[in-house]
Image: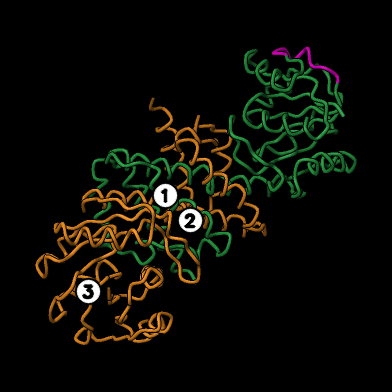
Chain colours: A orange, B green
Amino acid sequence: MTVCLLGAGNVAVHLGKQLQAAGYKVLQVYSRTDASARSLAQTLACAWTDDLQSLSPADYYLCALKDEALPLVLQQIPSFPGVWLHTSGSLGLDVFESYTKNCGVLYPLQTFSKQRELNLSKVPFFIESRSPEVLSNIRSMAEKLTERVYELDSSKRSYLHLAAVFACNFSNHLYELAAEILQDQALSFDLLLPLIDETAGKVHEKSPKEAQTGPALRMDHNIIDKHLALLESQPARAELYRLLSESIFESNKKV
Amino acid sequence: MTVCLLGAGNVAVHLGKQLQAAGYKVLQVYSRTDASARSLAQTLACAWTDDLQSLSPADYYLCALKDEALPLVLQQIPSFPGVWLHTSGSLGLDVFESYTKNCGVLYPLQTFSKQRELNLSKVPFFIESRSPEVLSNIRSMAEKLTERVYELDSSKRSYLHLAAVFACNFSNHLYELAAEILQDQALSFDLLLPLIDETAGKVHEKSPKEAQTGPALRMDHNIIDKHLALLESQPARAELYRLLSESIFESNKKV
């Protein structure tokens, strides 16, 4: 089976490598910028292009592009051979449907960074297609990458993606705010790693609601007011602190 | 060396067990409620009391109480033999100082839950005392529990505790909000575990700033507006989403 990769970002890099390892022949990488297309193509030892008119014929066109880029790219594609897939959590299937019925979604629920190895075998992949044949092909592709393949429609996938933003993007940003607080005190971020690991580890055993600890749980104003005083010169962080504390307190009140 | 434990919550349970394993003799557990004092005392096979007038003579009085409870407890203690320690991130050393100079702090930077085993050996402990002799005793106690002992004053400790609230309490609450979003869609929280693990794992290698991914980084309004629409009926969560996204965007702009 042959694949053209559209996109050369974090998701394209990881999926490209692992599809190749799984026996798919990656023919070509397209990216709007020649340099990133070339860089990924060199990793995969395949062709590259920055010209959508020069896409190679292939069995699959796997679009790992930014959400806003995909519709613009599709408008410029001269014809739609093969099966068209995207990897987005928040784009519906309908983005393809005025162009081709041979289309679907292959969404890996993970955060990808270049230069960090990642084992996809436990990563949940969510697949969708209106064509039973295409769906079966996507399933077989996904099953070569992971043990966890789930069929999910576009609406539920968008909620899943929203949940992922809370659990990953926002959590990581809180790590960043914590890192900045430590940096201002000349303390190392490394000090927090056992705490971060335990916080992530706990929710394998308990629900996050059961795992919650800390001053906001019972609205301990002694501590909360001290913390707000420490954040006095940073109103945006203080406001986040207040809202998150209130949200914890409100959740804890619910039975 | 003998220890009386004041408090029978999560921190007292873990420290009590591990001090005992390290060779300290835990004589007695005090708690305001007889039942929790008894429960921990039974685990440790020691005496218990709910009466501050009946504290046993001991080398150390380790107070693992809520911040607001400690001053109230201290007011009721008839006399101050031994060394008095607390385990709080946000209370200063001064809470003890009108009562005794033989006092200090032993603060473990971790989130503790009953019924979850925890290896303290990699957990950073922060110690403080104005008495060099007491400090050296606390250091020797801490070094029996962990490989990572740091001396830190009350002011820096309060910032450390604030950072811990961001990195742990608030992150865990974001896991909870994600769990609720999934639950509303009849999706399992387990689906998020590889993502949560990778998010926590990444910051062992990269700074949280470098590790950040997701729609807020470049303020991708396509996705952000869709997510806010999904949260339309939940204004508190939508507001958190907005503030966290703006905070990520602002941090990313900084060089």
Would you say A29 lies left or right of B21 here?
left
Q: Work out whether residue A134 or residue A249 is closer to the camera in this orientation and state it.
A: A134
The image shows residue B1, relative to residue B249, as above or below, that is: above
Residue A123 image label: none
Reading the image, the residue beneath label 3 is: A59
Asked which quadrant contains residue B58, the reply is top right
Q: Is B64 included in the stretch rendered in magenta?
A: no
Would you say B169 lies left or right of A38 here?
right
Q: Work out whether residue B44 or residue B213 is closer to the camera in this orientation and state it.
A: B44
Reading the image, the residue beneath label 1 is: A167
Where residue A8 appears, as percent x and y from the top left, is 35, 76
Same chain letter for marks 1 and 2: no
Residue depicted at 72% across the width and 13% down the height: B49
Where residue A42 appears, as percent x and y from the top left, is 42, 84
- Discs 1, 2 touching: Cβ within 8 Å: yes
Give the amino acid at mark 1. Answer: Ala
Would you say B225 lies left or right of A205 here?
left
- Discs 3, 1 touching: Cβ within 8 Å: no
Reading the image, the residue beneath label 2 is: B199
Please tell me whether mark 2 sits on a helix, a strand or a loop. Answer: helix
Category of crowding for the residue at label 3, using alpha-carbon neighbours closer than 10 angstroms: few (below 14), some (14–19), many (at least 20): some
What is the distance, in whole Å, between disc 1 and disc 2 at their CAs?
9 Å
- Residue B228 in sight here: no
| Range shown magenta | B49-57
What is the distance, in whole Å, between disc 2 and disc 3 at their CAs?
34 Å
